[in-house]
Amino acid sequence: ATAGLKGVGGLVATFEIEHEKQKLGVLTCELFADKAPVTVANFVGLARGLRPWLDPRSKQWQRKPLFDNNLFHRVIPEFMIQAGDPRCSVDVYCMGYPGTGEPGYAIPNEIRPELRFDRPGILAMANRGPDTNGSQFLITERETPWLDGSYTIFGQCGDVETIKKISAVPTIGRDLPEHQIFIKKVTISRKAK
């Protein structure tokens, strides 16, 4: 997943966010490759287009960045924002079922007791039960201790104000934003030592 990345420092994901075709902000997330190696490798591979994923419309395996132009399909004020549904990469209405898409495979949980939902900006996998992680992820707006032990934490994101802006947009059914908020691009890099 990291082939060709320059440098030797820790991994960082930079999310460029757009709302109504205007730049909304940038989220910079440190990835915990030492604590959740399988999850981080999966996320980085999907972000860089190196990990194949199943396109829900064509039913063909794709090798292109999954998160670029992906919709934040679930936003809940004072809680979290969620993205990464492949259905929301091919259709702004997520084919009518936001939050139900999968990349065609599942990876196991990597729960670490020392990693807790004890602050804003926690980056974690979204799932529908143990060992059903795929491509969907969430970023918390505040501490959410009721999530501890059930979701793989694999990073910490900065710029809580951007997270708050995203979570506060008006929604329609199923917490879907009324006006689309897109991840324009995710860039994976290494931070300087």
Image (cartoon, grey):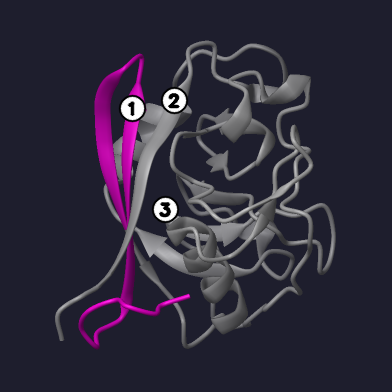
Quarter of the image where the C terminus is located: bottom left
Mark 1 is surrounded, within 10 Å at the Cα level, by few (under 14), some (14 to 19) or many (20 or more) other residues, namely many
| Residue in front for this viewpoint, 128 or 18 | 18
Please name which of the two marks, 1 or 3, marks the residue nearer to the observer.
1
Alpha-carbon span between mark 1 and mark 3? 21 Å
| Residue in front for this viewpoint, 67 or 10 | 67
Residue type at tag 2: Ile
Q: Secondary structure at mark 3?
A: loop
Tag shown at residue 123: none
Q: Is residue 13 left or right of residue 99?
A: left
State the residue at coordinates (74%, 36%): 58
Q: Which residues are magenta?
A: 1-28
Compared with 16, 44 (above or below) is: below
Q: Is residue 34 magenta?
A: no
Q: Secondary structure at mark 2?
A: strand
Q: Earlier in the sequence, mark 1 or mark 3?
A: 1
Q: Position of residue 129 (x, y in %)?
A: 85, 59
Mark 2 is surrounded, within 10 Å at the Cα level, by few (under 14), some (14 to 19) or many (20 or more) other residues, namely many
Residue type at tag 3: Pro
Is the C-beta separation of discs 1 and 2 under 8 Å? yes
Compared with 16, 192 (above or below) is: below
Question: Would you name the residue on which mark 3 appears?
Answer: 120
Question: Would you name the residue on which mark 1 appears?
Answer: 18
Q: Is residue 21 magenta?
A: yes
Residue type at tag 1: Glu
Q: Position of residue 44 (x, y in %)?
A: 47, 67
